[in-house]
Image (tube, rainbow, N blue to C red):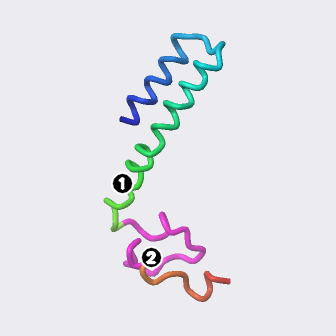
Amino acid sequence: MAVALLLAAGTLIQQHTIDSTDMLVWILVLSTLSTPYLAAVILSFISAFTKLPASLVHGTSTPPQPGTTVLDAVKSGPTAKESR
């Protein structure tokens, strides 16, 4: 659905000149409507790869312990060093 909405917005840009406010509003509406679909796809990829190293997703300043997954890092929360 996100691809279809973005393709529709791209087609409007390519086929028509954006000389009216009405055309610009439609392009913005189509682009805005695709945002939740893109977010859902991104978050589903993140949740599908629960065995990723925590440093790729969690963004900790210290390297994770060997064997730590994203779920382990989220469950344990920030350490004393990270909260400062």
Label total for image:
2
Residue in view at x 36 percent, y 54 percent: 45
Span shown in magenta: 52-73
Judge by depth and name the residue closer to the eye, 52 or 16: 16
Q: Residues within 10 Å of mark 2 (few under 14, many from 20)?
A: few
Q: Is residue 31 magenta?
A: no
Judge by depth and name the residue closer to the eye, 75 or 63: 75
Q: Residues within 10 Å of mark 1 (few under 14, many from 20)?
A: few
Q: Residue furthest front?
A: 22
Q: Vertically, is 69 above or below 83?
A: above
Quarter of the image for residue 22 reads top right
Q: Amino acid at mark 2?
A: Val
Quarter of the image for residue 67 reads bottom left
Residue in view at x 55 percent, y 86 percent: 79
Q: Position of residue 4 (x, y in %)?
A: 38, 29
Residue wearing tag 2: 74
Quarter of the image for residue 51 reads bottom left
SS type, badge 1: helix
Q: Amino acid at mark 1?
A: Phe
SS type, badge 2: helix
Q: Is residue 16 left or right of residue 43?
A: right
Q: Position of residue 84 (x, y in %)?
A: 68, 83
Q: Vertically, is 76 above or below 51?
A: below
Q: CA distance from mark 1 to mark 2?
A: 17 Å
Say if mark 1 contacts mark 2, CB within 8 Å: no
- Mark identifier at residue 45: 1
Q: Is residue 59 magenta?
A: yes
Q: Which mark is first along the chain, 2 or 1?
A: 1
- Mark identifier at residue 82: none
Chief secondary structure of the magenta span? loop
